[in-house]
Image (tube, rainbow, N blue to C red):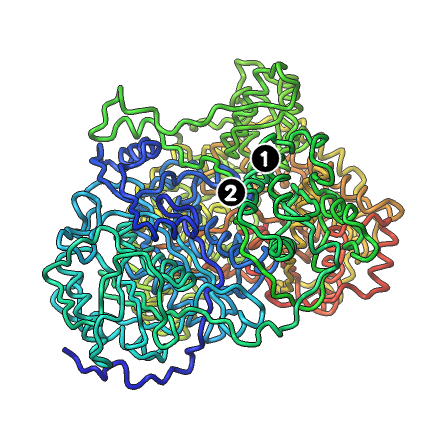
Amino acid sequence: MRSCTEGNEGTVRSLYSEDIAVIGMDCLLPNADGTEEFFDNLKLGRDSVSEFPEKRRRDADNCRAYAGLGRADYRLGNYLCEIDSFDYRFFHITPREAALMNPNQRILLQLIYRTIQDAGLSEERVRGSDTGLFIGYIGDYDGGAYTSMVYESQEESSPTGSLASMMAGRIAYLLDLRGPAMLIDTACSSSLTAVHQACRAIRSGECSMALAAGVRTVLFPGREHSIGIESEDGYTRVFDENASGTGLGEGAAGILLKSLPEAEKDGDMIYAVIRGSAVNQDGSCIGLTAPNGNAQTRVLRQAWKDAAVRAEEISYIEAHGTGTRLGDPVEIEALNQAFRCDTEEEDFCRIGSVKSNLGHLYDCAGIVGVIKTALMLYHRCYVPSAHFHRLNPEIRLEHSPLRISEEYCEWEPRNGRWIAGVSAFGFSGTNCHLVMEAHREEEGEDEREERRSAPEASHLFPLSAKSREALYELINSYRILALDLEDRELEALCTSMQLDRTHYDYRLAFQLSDSESLWRTLEEIYDYRLLDEPDYLPEGVCFGRAEEEGEGSPRAEGLTMEELCASYVRFRSFSFESIYYHRRKNRMRLPLYPFEKERCWIRLPKEKLRKSPGREEETGGPGEEMEPIVLRGREEGASYSRMEREIAGIFQREMGFHEFSVHDSFYALGGDSITAYRIVNRINAAHGSQMTMADILQYSTIEKLAAHVEENVGDPEERGALYHIEKAPKQSSYPLSYAQQRMFLLYLRDPEDSSYNMPFSIRFRGQLDIERFRSSFQRIFRLHDIFRSRFYIEDGAARQSVDEEKELSITELRGGEEASLPRLRELMNRPFDLGKEPLLRVALLEISKEEYLSFIVMNHIAADGSSLRILSDEFVKLYQGMPVGRQELQYKDFALWQRKLDLSRQERFWLEKMEGYHREELPLDFERRGGERKSEELGFSMDKGSAEKLRRLCREKDLSLFSVLMAAFQLALSCFTASEEVIVGTPISGRTAIETQQMVGMFVNVMPVRGRIEREKKLSEFIRRTHRLLLSVLGNQDYPFELLVEKLKEEREAFRNPIFDTVFAFQNMDRPEFSLPGLSAAMENEDKRTKFDITMEASEEEGGLSFLLRYAGTLFLRESMEGFFALYRDLVREIAEGSELPIGELFSLISRNGGVDGELTEDAAEFSGLDFDF
């Protein structure tokens, strides 16, 4: 046994050992939805062992079948009753996206939100803060299988929702948390280690608050997932003579942490205090996964030192407690040794383990132990250890400081203090121990200045939710709360509801007089569902949906209670903060938000399930069927047409909803341009119609769109003629697409021009498997004919053919980054020989065993930005050993199809739109000259709140965000150039045919958007006109820009692009992801050149909006572009605020005010590198 002094030389605390307050907690456990139900179960010594829930069996059977596991022998365990429900509407996620998320991620997202709520923090107080997020999660347990199913079963995969490595980042993104966010996997000690790391982050100043959480569910709990410590009957008998292993457990838990001084200063409600913690490793011992008593003793002593506590002060230990014949005695002996270093006193410290109630939650076990211990400290009581009857004979407690906690009883302080320890030991060898103490109110705290309210407001009861049904559930929760509420607590209740909750659109408000009337009012509303019939609400109760924006928040002075209630219900902008002053100490923990339970589950292909081993075809089940569609919006008994049901079915497939009103707007449902593309492709494929994105956006409801489709359906024999690509007959060569042809002609003019190279870099950190890297890219090279194509002139025409002999040679380098960069830069900048060499280059620099830099270079004739996304997805799959099939249709099939299209109608549209066009003249600072354009950049970001104002404007006015941002750009350009007509180019994906969605190649088309600015017109009128114009542009997007240039016969100017000099691009597609187990990766666009005078790129970024201005530094001074960019920024903000000024007045106002405060940065926004150059 190691010396007692090792790891605990005295009790002097380390520099960063500030006490940490636990201010919020929540849990989702078997038979316990929340900490209150959990503690009730603990007091009763209740376990949660049951059969595998019947309602989950079908999903589990399908998952097992898909994974090739056959039928299951489901063991008894501690199961959650459901893992498929999720309130996607609350988080503004479409049902389709939610279904692709790993169930653990969905569960944790809701739980973390409720944890924040439990701390009495509104959403607004946390969003945009430096709050950290630390998640304990074993990523490869079931998660890998789920990720594989997502990849293989979807037409367009969604790695962000299923990859373990994305869990912390995705949740931080959705909640706008800006502190450190990370996933921690140390096996069974993961979540306790996450708490340890969260405390360290607060103490070091990395974040002011931190969330720590863990989650564990089992998708298909068969016996093949055993790790060797499971009990046969599902029960966990910690420290008992009948201990035979640990039962399987599921659950999720989270806590919110803050430094104790800050929590006390802010008047936070505190469950318990974390005094200190420690983490260590077993090192070399009898076996990798065997418990190491010496290491456990060391980590206990280290944690006690960090907490500055003596062993004799500790009166409870929440043990790791696996319930195994080997593990329990080792842990008890390690504890005895740790205590004996300080004291010989006996029988003063109780010990228990939550595993006796819930089984082993593995990665989530430690944090559940923290919540159990915090509740015990808060209530000053011990709870019994379930299933303990007689001590394991291998455990010696004679003369020990320890005794088993066998009953629910009061916890007497020891030397005036309640101190406990929590342990978690991972089979990875990582051990963690945490020291906690009950929080004691400081004397004199009642002298703290109290936050007073206006007399009327102090008893205003405000309740809100995001839907009517959720509001009913909240009413029920508060109805139950009112049964035990005392009248003296009413002010604390009301002020907590007013100041500690986010206020959503469905609102209820009334004045409280006493707790009895509160219960009676809520009982009546809930029992008789009076929100459905507001005319029958009790007198004085206001209910409605807040929609209007008030001119600032109403002041309390002079307002009656009725006026306050009415203002709260009516105005979104109503703020209680404005009617309070100073601080307040009266706070109360409130019921948490009742998320609606909508089923979200991945749809698995039926044919894969039927072919799975051990699954009989006739009884195998149909796989995951889509829910029946429910249409509403008309009077009861009214019918809906076949076409309306068909359109609703397409909406369901692309967006995931199963219930629609025929009057629901496409925008209000969360539709975007990508979704519109998919919908129009499905309609055209089914009906031979020539619907466009413009039709979806213009006829934005199911009712209108169905009527429009019925009026425009084509001849059944010609269905799919326009938007259905067929495989080209085999021939020696093929024509080029229009975009390819223009690039090939530019290449012939100057073969040494490398401006159409597309270079990207990926920096990997971690241990990269070089052989997998090689084989993955070799496979990608063979999957896509375009990389093996060569281009040449044959009989006077440009042609392409596939050279099957071409091989991909991957350049591999080792050494320092600086020394290797010249070679890599040469690889990026060397022109491609389009007649000979492969059109994909890959290089890999091994900087060290933990860092690699890869360069990928493609030529624009072979790929576009969306192609990069496809390659990214394929690489992630191939690197992890997942199958990736070859697409039946290749780019040459598209090129031949495009050449046969009848585009006469679209040609007439463009010639009419561009008739008599006039180019604006940009006020250049330097003359145009030949040579490479040097690209300079400016950026700014719009916060999530302002961006949400823009999105709300779009939903309410049936506008697209793209239209609004484009209108602002055209206005800025008009003001900058003093021109009443501007032409802006905008890139369009060009992938209108559904077969092109997963095809690598050059599809992007760029179209001119011609705007006429009438300064006497209102801003809103110009935005609406721009929206209509863009709809018509999208409806005619198949017409190649190259043909338009040819038809317009514009006189070309030297060193100038045809038709327009400026481009506006809006990016709302998923970023390319290179997220891999054990590796972090950062992708960067290495092309720093610009082909246009000015390019503005807007991107949806972490809930906000980011803007990047690229400009030719050879044409403009930086000061000029800063002025132009500030003008655009101010116009966007004016639109977000709903300005109704005439355009001319708006220009004058912005000019007089000198712009809105705020700095421009050279790199304020990180963009995905999707290419918009042409």
How far apart in space, not on screen, are marks 2 and 1 (Cα)? Answer: 17 Å
Question: Could you say whether the residue bearing mark 2 is in a helix, strand or loop?
Answer: loop
Q: Is residue 227 left or right of residue 983?
A: left
Q: Give how far across and how far down residue 291 sits, in percent.
A: 17, 64
- Sort mark 1 into few (<14), some (14-19) or many (20+) by Cα contacts within 10 Å: some
Q: Which mark is residue 378?
A: none
Q: Nearer the viewer, residue 269 or 1053?
A: 269
Q: Would residue 741 be visible to someone looking at this image?
A: no
Q: Give how far across and how far down residue 68 sits, in percent.
A: 24, 36
Name the residue that disc number 1 marks. 526
Q: Which mark is residue 595?
A: 2
Q: Give how far across and how far down residue 163 sits, in percent.
A: 38, 50
- Report the mark closest to the observer, 2 or 1: 1
Q: Give how far across and how far down residue 1087 sits, in percent.
A: 53, 60
Q: Nearer the viewer, residue 965 or 1077?
A: 1077
Q: Would residue 83 be visible to someone looking at this image?
A: yes
Q: Hey, which residue is sitting farthest left in the picture?
A: 393
Q: Is residue 868 left or right of residue 1025?
A: left
Q: Can you say whether 513 is above or below 903 in the image?
A: below
- Sort mark 2 into few (<14), some (14-19) or many (20+) by Cα contacts within 10 Å: many
Q: Can you say whether 946 is above or below 68 in the image?
A: below
Question: Could you say whether the residue bearing mark 1 is in a helix, strand or loop?
Answer: helix
**Residue 537's quadrant in the figure?**
top right
